[in-house]
Image (cartoon, coloured by chain):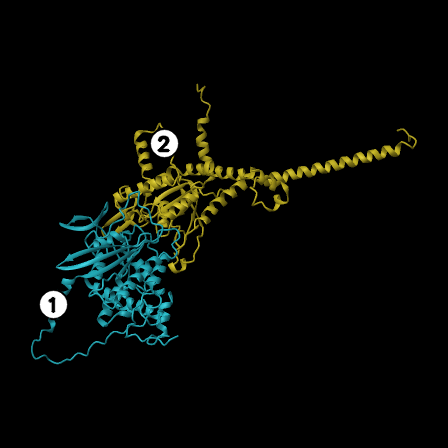
Chain colours: A yellow, B cyan
């Protein structure tokens, strides 16, 4: 008899079914100078043509262009699971002659999403919170430079505590294997020197087999991933069509691990760590933002200003939002208290009056 | 107002970004050829041989400047062009290499000899260009350097006791490296070329062209050519300086089809089909630098060294330098530099008409 079988081992299945029904939201940001193959890579990763009708403006037009943030959504379904993928693009980044502060719109955007979530979370109706927070930022580094450029470092320093960064070397077919290794090492050194925290892929479980552990370690060592993207089919060897880029001297295969790290990136980003990226965004980055927000409220100066006046209604933007619902209800309570007190006073007055007017007169009839 | 110089010349020299056509400086007319049948062999065709001998003895100067963001392969390309280590590569991956905060100008000279002819080659590097977050006006140090060389030459020229051969440090050719984004020129590229195409011969080059397939390359080149045209940027060989029909057809073909040259550089040799070739060995094939099916390095080399070297120097001397000189003389009221503004006293060059006293 199964006396020890309770049955909750089926819990993961229930969760799985629930999440399949609910679907899966993911927001991915791509950033980096133009011309590094970002759009091609996204199309290759998700096998879609998200950038079909895109028009890249000419240099003359870009002279005065400022950074814009563009969002594109696509629903991808595979194996019965629906993924609602939102892509955030940053055209204009690094393009101008003067790129000072060009990363600020990106920082504001990321924080805006956090703020929206904070507002929703503290609100009254929490059933259908839309999570538009950026879960991951693929940052493209040029293969032509000698490591991170000043602009790269400035951008990464501005966003590394706010979003999961996965650095990627674009157009990696410009590099020979030795050059790739040297560039990766240089970038890793620079990231360490500048104390930039990129997304740390979690360690695999200790009970995995040796092969898997070795593979996992290899993948971690190949960060930043040197990628090549392409949606053009160049060959038909094997079960699936081979995508790549055809040159006069040879053909680069996108999914060939000897040619580039595309497979690694796809595996780590899409196949194994999508959920972890969301969790880190929620548990670490968002919590950090929330704590910072609330702490700035808890400082004495801030609280005095907040409680003192009219601020609670108009400047919902100045005060971090949890204050808003609390203040409202407190105010209501206070008002009700006031009313009660007033009514009590009136009652007492009336009673006193009645007593006074009754004393001189005869006792009226008894009932 | 100085006589002899039309208003428009001054205006053209003063205004920076308005692409006005520059008036041609006075070039002596070609002598009328006497088409008489020669009665015998005179021997005037040996002048070519005499010139050659002289050139071999004296050698000649050539100054080439390279401009572009760091990492675009400028030094490697120059080394490949002249088949020697004439440019010190910012040895790529050492930790100590820091990008300079402002644009530096580094000129390194070498003497190269080939077939008895000596060339004093100076490579002028411009580290720091386009690498900062704010690159506004980063071309100014470069423009300043170029003008300083013109100034040096001018000073020597107006000397009473002139040297037999004035050392020529003027920049004869500026290779501008365009990043192979595949989209279009970057705003910085446009700004640089707008400012400097009137001052020096600019040859735009598409760097690290091994990242583009054939279609991408030709599309990119077309777009770049169009953008340069729309913005009024005249790169070398400039249309206005074609001397005759032969030049024009040859240069037209280069301007409209080949340029900007999409190049790949390398200083390593590999064995391909039994030959040793310069190239890059990738996991998917060997890129041969001198193979025209792979990249246009050979075209660039032939263009700069084998066919247009002398022309580059002549255009620099007859046109860019003359423009500078005219502007300087004009600024100084028709007097040579040194009188008035700069303090050192030199007698006026008699050929130039002196202005009436103001």
Q: Residue at x 44, y 20 (%)?
A: A2
Residue B63: % across, % down: 24, 59
Q: Residue B49 bears which disc, if any?
A: 1
Image-quadrant location for residue A167: top left
Classify A248 as above or below A366.
Answer: below
Foreground disc of the pair 1, 2: 1
Residue drawn 76% across the image and 37% down it: A343
Quarter of the image where the N terminus of chain A is located: top left
Query: Is residue B340 rendered to the left or right of residue A110?
Result: left
Q: Secondary structure at mark 2?
A: loop
Q: Residue B73 vs residue A127: left or right?
A: left
Q: Residue at x 57, y 43 (%)?
A: A319
Q: Is residue B185 visible?
A: no
Asked if residue A215 can be seen in this view, the reply is yes
- Label 1 – label 2 distance at C-alpha: 78 Å
- The answer to whether A119 is drawn above or below residue A51 in the figure is above
Image coords of residue B348 (percent x, y): 30, 72
**Secondary structure beneath disc 1?**
helix
Specify the label residue A204 is tagged with. 2
Q: Chain of mark 1?
A: B
Disc 1 packing (10 Å; few <14; some 14–19; many ≥20): few
Are there few (<14), some (14-19), or many (20+) residues within 10 Å of tag 2? few
The location of residue B52, given as percent across then percent down, is 13, 65
Q: The disc numbered 2 marks a residue on which chain?
A: A
């Amino acid at each position: 008899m199964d006396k020890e079988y309770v049955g909750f081992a089926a819990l993961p299945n229930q969760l799985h079914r629930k999440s399949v029904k609910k679907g899966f939201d993911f927001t991915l940001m791509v950033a980096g100078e133009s011309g590094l193959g970002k759009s091609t890579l996204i199309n290759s990763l998700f096998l879609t043509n998200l950038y079909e009708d895109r028009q890249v403006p000419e240099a003359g037009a870009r002279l005065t262009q400022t950074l814009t943030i563009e969002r594109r959504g696509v629903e991808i379904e595979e194996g019965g699971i629906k993924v609602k993928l939102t892509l955030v693009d940053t055209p204009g980044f690094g393009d101008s002659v003067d790129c000072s502060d060009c990363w600020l719109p990106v920082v504001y955007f990321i924080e805006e999403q956090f703020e929206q979530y904070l507002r929703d979370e503290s609100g009254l109706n929490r059933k259908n919170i839309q999570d538009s927070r950026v879960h991951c930022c693929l940052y493209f580094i040029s293969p032509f430079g000698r490591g991170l450029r000043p602009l790269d470092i400035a951008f990464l320093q501005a966003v590394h505590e706010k979003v999961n960064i996965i650095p990627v070397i674009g157009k990696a077919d410009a590099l020979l294997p030795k050059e790739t290794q040297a560039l990766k090492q240089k970038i890793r050194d620079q990231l360490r020197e500048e104390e930039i925290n990129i997304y740390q892929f979690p360690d695999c479980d200790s009970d995995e087999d040796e092969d898997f552990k070795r593979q996992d370690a290899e993948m971690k060592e190949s960060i930043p991933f040197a990628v090549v993207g392409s949606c053009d089919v160049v060959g038909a060897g094997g079960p699936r069509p081979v995508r790549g880029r055809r040159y006069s001297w040879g053909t680069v295969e996108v999914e060939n691990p000897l040619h580039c790290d595309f497979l690694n990136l796809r595996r780590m980003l899409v196949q194994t760590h999508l959920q972890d990226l969301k969790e880190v965004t929620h548990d670490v980055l968002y919590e950090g933002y929330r704590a910072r927000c609330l702490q700035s409220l808890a400082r004495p100066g801030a609280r005095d200003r907040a409680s003192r006046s009219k601020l609670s209604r108009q400047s919902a933007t100045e005060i971090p939002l949890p204050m808003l619902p609390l203040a409202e209800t407190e105010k209501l309570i206070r008002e009700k208290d006031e009313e009660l007190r007033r009514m009590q006073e009136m009652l007492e007055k009336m009673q006193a009056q009645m007593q006074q007017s009754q004393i001189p007169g005869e006792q009226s009839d008894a009932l | 107002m100085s006589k002899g110089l039309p208003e428009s010349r001054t205006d053209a020299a003063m205004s920076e970004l308005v692409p006005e056509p520059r008036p041609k400086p006075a070039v002596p007319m070609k002598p009328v050829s006497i088409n008489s049948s020669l009665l015998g062999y005179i021997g005037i065709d040996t002048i070519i041989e005499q010139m050659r001998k002289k050139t071999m003895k004296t050698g000649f100067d050539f100054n080439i400047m390279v401009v572009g963001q760091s990492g675009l392969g400028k030094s490697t390309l120059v080394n490949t062009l002249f088949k020697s280590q004439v440019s010190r590569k910012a040895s790529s991956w050492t930790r100590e290499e820091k990008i300079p905060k402002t644009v530096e100008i580094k000129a390194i000279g070498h003497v190269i000899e080939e077939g008895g002819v000596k060339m004093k080659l100076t490579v002028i590097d411009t580290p720091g260009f386009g690498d900062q977050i704010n690159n506004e006006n980063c071309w100014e140090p470069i423009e300043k350097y170029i003008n300083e060389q013109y100034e040096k030459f001018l000073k020597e020229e107006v000397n009473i006791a002139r040297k037999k051969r004035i050392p020529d440090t003027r920049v004869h050719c500026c290779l501008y490296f365009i990043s192979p984004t595949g989209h279009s020129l970057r705003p910085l590229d446009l700004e640089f070329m707008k400012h400097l195409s009137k001052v020096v011969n600019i040859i735009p080059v598409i760097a690290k062209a091994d990242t583009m397939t054939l279609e991408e390359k030709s599309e990119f080149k077309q777009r770049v050519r169009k953008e340069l045209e729309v913005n009024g940027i005249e790169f070398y060989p400039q249309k206005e300086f074609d001397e005759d029909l032969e030049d024009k057809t040859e240069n037209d073909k280069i301007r409209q089809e080949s340029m900007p040259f999409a190049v790949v550089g390398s200083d390593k040799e590999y064995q391909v089909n039994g030959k040793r070739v310069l190239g890059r060995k990738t996991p998917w094939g060997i890129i041969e630098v001198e193979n025209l099916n792979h990249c246009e390095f050979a075209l660039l080399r032939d263009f700069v060294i084998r066919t247009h070297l002398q022309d580059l120097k002549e255009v620099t001397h007859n046109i860019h330098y003359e423009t500078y000189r005219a502007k300087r003389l004009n600024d100084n009221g028709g007097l040579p530099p040194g009188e008035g503004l700069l303090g050192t006293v030199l007698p006026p060059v008699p050929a130039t008409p002196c202005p009436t006293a103001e």
